[in-house]
């Protein structure tokens, strides 16, 4: 029996309890991490420099600075939360999560670097501060945009399918958001501007993936036999679309994985978020949204039967 | 049947070639009109956030801030920064975000962007007779006069209303002084010798050439209707994305090969089709970015990758469907027909759901969010063409009698 044939025999809906437990554990770990973060750091997620503001020091030296050494120098001056990036051939960008840096301290850091890598190129040294509130405005507005976009997506699915289908899809997406936020909290991935894009991608992927499974259920409902139970129908819908879901997310996963490996440090967090989102999004459309829809429909059908009796 | 396939095939080939020419022009021949537009995170540059503040003379009203954005837009365009952006952070926000990709000097940028640049000509009794909004042109010139030879000056030309007002004012003030102020600072106060009726003149004020050139630019683009304070400025290292930019084409090729390999393992000949479709897809999508000047930033690339996933997804949905139809003992030909038509609804609905979402994200969102939704929407639309239409054409084309007889080989 090939994998394809074996998948068709799986009882996915029958094991709803397992899938829900797995998801609850993952989400609980994430929420736990957020609670720990709130207690020890004051915020559930690690906000990057784009959200909380900070200070950036740019400088170019005669020799190319080594990122690890620069990090060490910053750390010896009391700055541990730093992002260090090479710029150009001999330049370095240091992002410190402090709103102000005393000229004496920044001077000392530059001097220590100059001692190792030769004098600073005249005119390349820049110390600039970024206002912390930028992120908040942008975030609020982006969240509003996302909320409204989701509302209309729900409306669209309700029109093309049924309200219950839309609700199940959106709940699957909420699951993915929780999982992604949980993982970000757990590994203390710093949230920066590109995160907004990664987050939107997760949401979109989740909804798109869900709709394809819902389409199969809708199609099966049209040819539903008089005695055919809904959970069996839904199960064959997910098993029949399982290979497609797997192939799709595996290929997308490959593309993002290449980005992860080759993109370098600046976009590693971005691609990590995407990877988590792809896995969670595929999982939720099969193992969360569909069982939720089954529970909903079965309850209604039971209620309808009771009313008849 | 064959003639229909041929027509479709010609259409696909024409579209692919046109897209290819656009890509060649933009990426290899470096035609400036089709140059890829890189966001600040990929090209580096200066980002400044300005906040509008109330003053006694000018309140930071909604209209005033919107007008200020317009003025800043003119100024940064006059600076010649390509792909510069000036946007309000939100429709009710008092903040204006200015991004100057490729720009390296935040101080000069701030000078030019944040200056009110209110030019006023005042009579001795303090009456404003002509102001900056009456200017049609201002430029840096060098003095030709004997005693000030070679000194930088700003020459200006007034519009019709300004010309009339200036003529009347100079006529009425012969022998008196008319003072010229810029942002409340006295630049010069010459004594009027005779009525000036040609609506042109020069301002001298001990400028350096750089200052005079900056002021001329500012005066030409109009004064800011509200006071703006820079609350944040940031030089983004031009190489934040340079490592990525260098490796991105290689990354794209590797990603494509991996996806193609997996599709071929899973779907054999059909996988081959999806590989070709994906190439055509990348070709058209890149051309669409170039033609529409879509800004490529990291979030936008996220949208692009997602749309690639969706393009492959459309193929997966269709190919799985064809398999199912074959399992029902249909002929290869009818299985392919049924596969495409039945799968179309799933592809259509999932893509349209995403399009609905992106439309609202674009409408309500700002910068980053918009960049994401534009690339994603373009990707979805392109994938409908390549993954559904072009793939169908290619599959039909490959459907030789030999393959039709041997469906196992065809589908793996």
Image (spheres, rainbow, N blue to C red):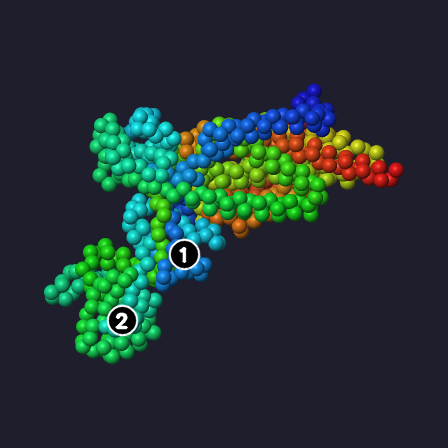
* Lower sequence index among marks 1 and 2: 1
The residue most toward the right is A309
Q: Nearer the viewer, residue B395 or A259?
A: A259
Q: Give the residue drawn at x 58%, y 47%.
A: A148
- Above or below, A295 against B161 in this view is above
- Crowding at mark 1 (Cα within 10 Å: few <14, some 14-19, many 20+): many
Residue where numbered disc 1 is placed = B69
Whether tag 1 and tag 2 are in contact, CB under 8 A, the answer is no
Which chain letter goes with mark 1? B
Q: Which residue is mark 2?
A: B126
Q: Nearer the viewer, residue A77 or B275?
A: A77
Q: Are marks 1 and 2 on the same chain?
A: yes
Q: Secondary structure at mark 1?
A: helix
Compare residues A245 and A1 and report the one nearer the observer: A245
Q: Gap between marks 1 and 2, in whole Å?
A: 30 Å
Question: Percent x, y for residue A261?
Answer: 45, 28
> Where, quadrant-wise, is the C terminus of chain A in this rendering?
top right
Residue A304 pos. (x, y %): 82, 39
Q: Which residue shows up at 63% across the image and 41% down it?
A: B350
Image quarter in which the N terminus of chain A is found: top right
In the picture as drawn, the residue positioned furthest to the top comes out as A1
Q: Nearer the viewer, mark 1 or mark 2?
A: 2
Give the quadrant of residue B204.
bottom left
Secondary element at image label 2:
loop
User: Label 2 lies in what chain?
Assistant: B
- Left or right: A177 in relation to B324: left
Residue A111 in view here:
yes
Q: Is residue B320 in view from this perspective? A: no
Q: Which mark is residue B206?
A: none
Could you say which is closer to the camera, residue B218 or residue B20? B218
**Image location (x, y in percent) of residue A172:** 63, 35
């Amino acid at each position: 029996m090939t994998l394809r044939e074996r998948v068709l025999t799986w009882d996915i809906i029958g094991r709803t309890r397992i899938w829900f437990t797995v998801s609850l554990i993952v989400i609980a770990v994430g929420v736990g991490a957020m609670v720990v973060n709130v207690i020890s750091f004051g915020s559930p997620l690690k906000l990057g420099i784009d959200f909380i503001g900070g200070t950036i020091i740019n400088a170019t030296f005669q020799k190319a600075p080594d990122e690890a050494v620069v990090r060490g120098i910053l750390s010896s001056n009391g700055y541990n939360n730093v992002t260090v990036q090479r710029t150009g051939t001999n330049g370095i960008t240091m992002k410190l999560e402090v709103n102000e840096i005393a000229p004496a301290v920044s001077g000392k850091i530059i001097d220590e670097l100059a001692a190792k890598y030769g004098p600073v190129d005249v005119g390349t040294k820049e110390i600039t501060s970024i206002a912390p509130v930028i992120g908040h405005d942008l975030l609020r507005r982006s969240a509003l945009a996302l909320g409204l976009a989701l509302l209309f997506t729900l409306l669209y699915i309700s029109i093309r399918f049924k309200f219950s289908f839309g609700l199940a899809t959106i709940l699957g997406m909420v699951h993915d958001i929780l999982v992604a936020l949980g993982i970000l909290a757990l590994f203390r991935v710093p949230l920066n501007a590109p995160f907004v894009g990664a987050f939107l991608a997760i949401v979109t992927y989740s909804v798109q993936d869900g709709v394809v499974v819902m389409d199969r259920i809708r199609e099966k409902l049209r040819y539903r036999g008089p005695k055919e139970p809904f959970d069996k129908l839904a199960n064959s819908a997910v098993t029949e679309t399982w290979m497609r879901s797997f192939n799709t997310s595996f290929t997308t996963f490959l593309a993002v994985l290449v980005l992860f490996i080759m993109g370098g440090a600046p976009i590693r967090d971005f691609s990590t978020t995407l990877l988590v989102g792809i896995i969670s999004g595929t999982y939720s459309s099969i193992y969360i949204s569909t069982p939720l829809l089954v529970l909903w429909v079965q309850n209604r059908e039971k209620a309808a039967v009771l009313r008849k009796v | 049947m064959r003639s229909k396939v041929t027509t479709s095939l010609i259409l696909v080939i024409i579209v692919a070639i046109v897209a290819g020419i656009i890509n060649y022009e933009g990426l290899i021949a470096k035609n400036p009109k089709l140059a890829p537009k890189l966001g600040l995170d990929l090209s580096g540059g200066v980002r400044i956030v300005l906040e509008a503040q109330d003053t006694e003379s000018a309140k930071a009203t909604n209209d005033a801030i919107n007008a200020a954005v317009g003025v800043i837009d003119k100024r940064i365009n006059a600076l010649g920064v390509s792909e510069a952006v000036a946007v309000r952070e939100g429709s009710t926000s008092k903040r204006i975000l200015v991004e100057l990709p490729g720009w390296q000097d935040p101080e000069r940028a701030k000078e030019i962007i944040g200056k009110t640049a209110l030019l006023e000509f005042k009579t001795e009794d303090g009456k404003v007779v002509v102001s900056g909004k009456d200017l049609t042109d201002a430029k840096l010139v060098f003095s030709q006069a004997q005693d000030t030879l070679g000194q930088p000056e700003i020459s200006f030309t007034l519009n019709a209303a300004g010309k009339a007002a200036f003529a009347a004012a100079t006529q009425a003030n012969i022998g008196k002084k008319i003072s010229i102020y810029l942002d409340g600072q006295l630049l010069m106060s010459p004594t009027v010798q005779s009525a000036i009726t040609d609506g042109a003149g020069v301002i001298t004020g001990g400028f350096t050439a750089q200052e005079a050139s900056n002021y001329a630019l500012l005066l030409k683009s109009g004064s800011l209707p509200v006071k703006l304070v820079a609350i944040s400025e940031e030089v983004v290292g031009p190489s934040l994305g340079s490592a990525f930019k260098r490796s991105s084409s290689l990354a794209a090729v590797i990603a494509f090969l991996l996806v193609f390999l997996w599709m071929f393992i899973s779907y054999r000949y059909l996988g081959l089709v999806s590989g070709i479709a994906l190439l055509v897809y990348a070709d058209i999508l890149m051309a669409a970015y170039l033609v529409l000047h879509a800004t490529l930033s990291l979030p936008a690339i996220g949208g692009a990758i997602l749309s690639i996933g969706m393009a492959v997804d459309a193929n997966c949905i269709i190919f799985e469907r064809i398999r199912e139809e074959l399992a029902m003992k249909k002929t290869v030909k009818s299985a392919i027909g049924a596969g495409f038509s039945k799968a179309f609804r799933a592809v259509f609905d999932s893509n349209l759901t995403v399009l609905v979402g992106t439309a609202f994200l674009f409408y309500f969102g700002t910068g980053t969010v918009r960049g994401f939704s534009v690339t994603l929407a373009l990707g979805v639309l392109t994938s409908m063409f390549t993954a559904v239409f072009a793939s169908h054409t290619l599959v039909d084309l490959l459907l030789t009698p030999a393959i039709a007889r041997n469906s196992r080989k065809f589908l793996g």
